[in-house]
Image: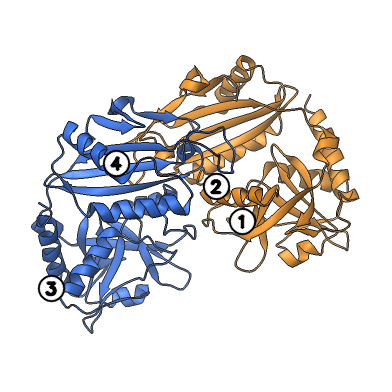
Chain colours: A blue, B orange
């Protein structure tokens, strides 16, 4: 973690960065967030993230803490103070501080918190390494389309994945279909060569990297469809992968200890990863 | 809100009471809590709440921040400093502060926060006033048995209830059965004179007041059963009520604008309320 964070109008040493104990983000998970990758000192798909942040706030009737133009200025200054050229920006907006009561308080100033962290630059070879995932029951609430900090189910799932040596846990709904990972979207490539990822509705978050990959696939004339797919279908797929802001595109070579396809990153995902690398370079 | 709060070993002016922005309670809803009523300077059903707190922590593998004996001493001191004779104590334990990452961090000191507030003493006449509830879809996660701060769905529901002039929102599952209120348990009395409240499992929180009321009903030889009941059954009931720590027992006289029974508090709930009042007095 870098040394300067932003909290409600102030750039503060990270160790001193705090919010009140009656901030609704702390007491009610009444807050939303975004994580944005930084490459070459610039935000990757920044407007996609800002649009989604606005939508999350709107769904919860939390006012925007500042205009997008002002937010961009603050972000630029925070990245500058922390000398972040490659890394990630974390933005959290909570409804604000109010005496504890379930119902939304009126006329409260939202809390805006931002942190940064330094990460290695996007690297094709490193990202192209295959990872394994496990499948778990999706126990989350019914509004996963809002990017809230109500992340305990995801934290539990990711902890279980890590304990089993896996990179991620794919969550499975009551119908046996994969919804998404705990902090990533899930994809497969069928034997027929079709790229599949679940359609967006209130059961999953509309990932920004997901959206970018769909655009890159369309532009390149790849065959894709947005629909549910089962765990069995995923295990029978020729390729699988995950997408997220900071992990980019990761080939999935094992699901529940079972090899996917030939058990190594396949041509489809490597092609998408290459296109994604170009997409990042275009941001320079 | 009283003027002194407790945060991680320190009694601090409430206005200065804060937690770090990377506290997992703020970033992941990775925290549990209890609210305990204070009557005549003593905790009502304190051990029931402490047992439940221990269970919540255990389910999430969060270590207890201190022994129960030590916790009781801190609570006594906090109530003394705030001169609370009648009111409520709020206890929140989060997993603690750690660099943001979904999976549970290891070797982290839990965050312990406590606040108090003053309330009017339990008053039979005031509590016996009937309230109305609305019904809403239960959109929460599948581990409502753990008392976590993942309360956004409840906050949304309570806000909707308030906007419609109702006291509470009863949440309804996919089968059309009432699970519970956003911060209370739901009860009905059938035409056959049977007291009904939903059985406990992972779909609802095992309310401490719920448990006390069941004990009082058993002791008094009242006929009761723990099972699901539908919205239709609730609307056709002769009586209905809610139970919670700070609202105690509240007669419900309207569900979705439809009168329950004779549209006023009935003999069954008034009897339970009287027994509950005696239960509180026995704590003196």
Q: Nearer the viewer, mark 3 or mark 2?
A: 3
Quadrant location of residue A19? top left
Q: Nearer the viewer, mark 3 or mark 4?
A: 4
Where is mark 4, residue-wise?
A71
Name the residue nearer the viewer: B249 or A23. Answer: A23
> Which badge, 3 or 4, comes first in the chain's sequence?
4
Where is mark 1, residue-wise?
B201
User: Cα distance, mark 3 to mark 4?
Assistant: 39 Å
Question: Is the same chain shared between marks 4 and 1?
Answer: no
Question: Is the same chain shared between marks 2 and 4?
Answer: no
Label disc, if present, on residue B146 of the rendered structure? 2
- Side (left or right) of A159 relative to A272: right
**Image marks 2 and 4: residues in contact by CB distance under 8 Å:** no
Give me the residue at 12% from left, 65% from top.
A275
Give me the residue at 70% from left, 50% from top.
B166
Q: Nearer the viewer, mark 2 or mark 4?
A: 4
User: Cα distance, mark 2 to mark 4?
Assistant: 37 Å
Question: Is the same chain shared between marks 3 and 4?
Answer: yes
Q: Is residue A165 visible?
A: no
Q: Nearer the viewer, mark 1 or mark 3?
A: 3
Where is mark 3, residue-wise?
A267
A269 versus A284 height, above or below: below
- Side (left or right) of B279 relative to A153: right
């Amino acid at each position: 973690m870098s040394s300067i964070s932003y909290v409600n109008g102030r750039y503060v040493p990270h160790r001193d960065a705090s919010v009140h104990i009656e901030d609704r983000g702390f007491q009610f998970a009444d807050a939303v967030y975004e994580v944005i990758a930084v490459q070459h000192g610039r935000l990757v798909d920044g407007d996609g993230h800002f649009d989604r942040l606005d939508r999350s706030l709107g769904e919860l009737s939390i006012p925007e803490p500042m205009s997008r133009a002002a937010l961009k200025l603050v972000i630029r200054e925070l990245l500058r103070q922390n000398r972040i050229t490659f890394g990630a920006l974390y933005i959290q907006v909570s409804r604000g501080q109010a005496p504890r009561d379930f119902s939304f308080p009126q006329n409260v100033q939202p809390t805006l918190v931002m942190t940064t962290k330094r990460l290695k630059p996007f690297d094709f070879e490193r990202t192209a390494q295959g990872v394994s995932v496990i499948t778990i029951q999706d126990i989350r609430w019914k509004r996963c389309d809002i990017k809230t900090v109500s992340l305990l189910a995801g934290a539990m799932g990711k902890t279980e994945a890590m304990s089993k040596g896996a990179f991620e846990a794919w969550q499975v709904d009551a119908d046996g279909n994969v919804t998404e990972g705990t902090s990533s979207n899930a994809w497969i490539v069928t034997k027929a060569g079709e790229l599949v990822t679940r359609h967006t509705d209130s059961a999953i978050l509309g990932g920004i990297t997901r959206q970018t990959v769909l655009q890159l696939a369309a532009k390149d004339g790849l065959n894709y469809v947005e629909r549910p797919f089962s765990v069995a279908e995923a295990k029978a797929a020729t390729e699988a992968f995950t997408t997220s802001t900071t992990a980019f595109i990761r080939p999935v070579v094992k699901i529940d200890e079972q090899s996917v396809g030939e058990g190594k990153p396949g041509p489809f995902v490597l092609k998408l990863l290459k296109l994604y690398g170009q997409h990042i370079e275009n941001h320079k």
